[in-house]
Image (cartoon, grey):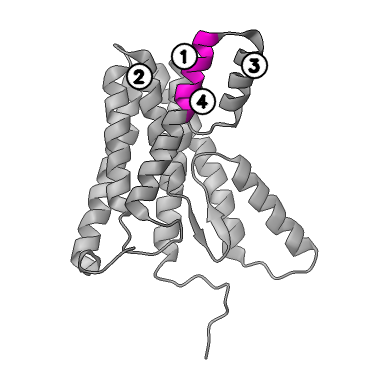
């Protein structure tokens, strides 16, 4: 008997939930810590582009160049994700572990450089965020974003509107979207506490979590035999 086309297979649901919530929490955490350190938001570029427009309007060339570099770093990070993964369609076995490990290296490098080369550290953090945002996967027409909440809030409202209009909406859509939203916010709160107590060293926690997640996925991929199949 065929499955309903919008049903999420059981073997992908735990991966989807665990990976999405972890990455969303890390993004919220990192963004707050960077802001607390005196930097700009690094997990999204909407406000950054607005800041660039304001700089151009004020003829503030120095800040405009920095902000432009920030946007370029985010795009470059997303480019790395595209190079590694090849597609944004969720499929177990793709090289998510490699992408997450690269993100860990970028964030770890930013952590080391913040006290010595603040601007470069911010650019590395933005690159890490761009890489993670490039990992946004689509599954059954639902895009799983983890570095900003505008898209999550939009999707949540859209799905709610569809439900109120009488359309069938799977319950896991709401659970996942709400989970991502809460994870991002909770990560930000934890980031604020961590910065208060540990300063720039607060960034070592998300770096370690990313490294652990990347190696764990890489090991699972090897054991499961995905390493011997084409993931592209």
Residue 38 marker: 1
The answer to whether marks 1 and 3 mark residues whose Cβ atoms lie closer than 8 Å is no
Q: Is residue 26 visible?
A: no
Q: Main secondary structure of the magenta part?
A: helix
Label 2 vs 3, first from the N-terminus = 3
Q: Quadrant of the C terminus?
A: bottom left
Q: Residue at x 55, y 31 (%)?
A: 45
Residue to which mark 3 is pinned: 54
Q: Residue at x 35, y 64 (%)?
A: 92
Q: Secondary structure at mark 2?
A: helix
Disc 4 crowd, CA 10 A, few/some/many (<14, 14-19, 20+): many
Q: Rounded to the nearest whole Å, what is the CA distance between mark 4 and mark 3?
A: 16 Å
**Residue 22 among those drawn in magenta:** no
The residue wearing badge 2 is 120
Q: Helix or strand or loop: what does disc 4 sit on? A: loop
Q: Position of residue 172 (x, y in %)?
A: 57, 63
Residue 204 shown left or right of residue 156 in the figure:
left
Give the mark nearer the N terminus: 2 vs 4.
Answer: 4
Q: Earlier in the sequence, mark 4 or mark 3?
A: 4
């Amino acid at each position: 008997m065929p499955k309903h086309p919008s049903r999420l297979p059981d073997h992908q649901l735990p991966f989807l939930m665990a990976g999405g919530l972890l990455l969303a929490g890390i993004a919220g955490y990192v963004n707050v810590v960077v802001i607390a350190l005196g930097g700009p938001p690094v997990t999204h570029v909407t406000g950054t582009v607005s800041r660039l427009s304001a700089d151009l309007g004020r003829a503030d060339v120095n800040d405009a160049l920095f902000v432009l570099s920030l946007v370029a770093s985010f795009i470059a990070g997303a480019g790395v994700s595209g190079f590694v993964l090849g597609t944004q369609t969720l499929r177990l076995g793709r090289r998510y572990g490699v992408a997450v490990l690269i993100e860990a290296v970028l964030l770890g490098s930013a952590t080391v450089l913040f006290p010595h080369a603040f601007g470069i550290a911010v650019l590395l953090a933005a690159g890490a965020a761009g890489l993670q945002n490039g990992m946004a996967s689509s599954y059954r027409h639902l895009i799983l974003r983890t570095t900003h909440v505008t898209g999550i809030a939009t999707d949540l409202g859209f799905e709610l509107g569809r439900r109120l209009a009488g359309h069938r909406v799977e319950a896991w859509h709401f659970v996942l979207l709400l989970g991502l939203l809460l994870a991002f916010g909770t990560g930000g709160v934890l980031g604020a506490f961590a910065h208060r107590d540990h300063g720039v060293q607060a960034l070592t926690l998300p770096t370690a979590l990313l490294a652990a997640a990347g190696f764990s996925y890489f090991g699972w991929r090897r054991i499961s035999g995905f390493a011997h199949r084409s993931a592209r």
